[in-house]
Image (spheres, rainbow, N blue to C red):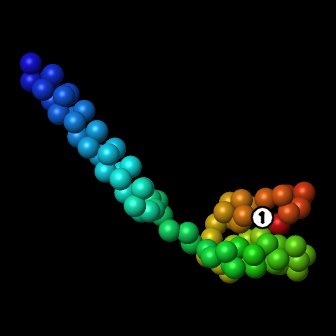
Amino acid sequence: MLAAIGEFERDLIKERAADGISRAKVNGVKFGARRKLSDDQISEIRMWRQSPQINRADLARKYGISRSTLYRLTEGLDGQNSE
């Protein structure tokens, strides 16, 4: 009996949370972490990536991001997998 009441209460909580989230989205609230780089910085990274003088590890260090993030940002710029 108590389990059924607990389950019902949990369903109510989930429903209220979903309503709150949908209301917040309608009001323009953004969820998740803030972007670490601006659009200008991403453009700079893409420009630098095409230069053979700097490797990806140095470029990632310069902007304080991981190499995997750098790979994702520059995906499709070249067919190389070397650093």
Instruction: Where is residue 80? Give x, y as percent.
Output: 89, 59
Quick check: can you spot residue 58?
no
Instruction: Where is residue 63? Give x, y as percent.
Output: 65, 78
Instruction: Where is residue 41? Give x, y as percent.
Output: 68, 78
Query: Number of marks in the image?
Result: 1
In the image, residue 5 above or below residue 68: above
- Based on the displayed image, in which of its 4 quarters is residue 42 positioned? bottom right
Amino acid type for the residue under numbered disc 1 = Thr
Residue at 44%, 62% in the rendered image: 28
Quadrant, the N terminus: top left
Residue at 64%, 66% in the rendered image: 66
Mark 1 surroundings within 10 Å by alpha-carbon count, few (fewer than 14), some (14 through 19), many (20 or more): some
Instruction: Where is residue 45? Give x, y as percent.
Output: 75, 75
SS for tag 1?
loop
Quick check: can you spot residue 51?
yes
In the image, residue 35 above or below residue 11: below
Q: Residue furthest left?
A: 1
The reply, left or right, for residue 3 in relation to residue 82 is left
In the image, residue 2 above or below residue 13: above
- Based on the displayed image, in which of its 4 quarters is residue 72 positioned? bottom right
Q: Residue furthest front?
A: 26
- Based on the displayed image, in which of its 4 quarters is residue 16 positioned? top left
Q: Nearer the viewer, residue 13 or 82?
A: 13
The reply, left or right, for residue 20 in relation to residue 43 is left
Residue at 55%, 69% in the rendered image: 35
Residue at 14%, 23% in the rendered image: 3
Q: Nearer the viewer, residue 33 or 69?
A: 33
Quadrant, the C terminus: bottom right
Report which residue position mark 1 lands on: 74
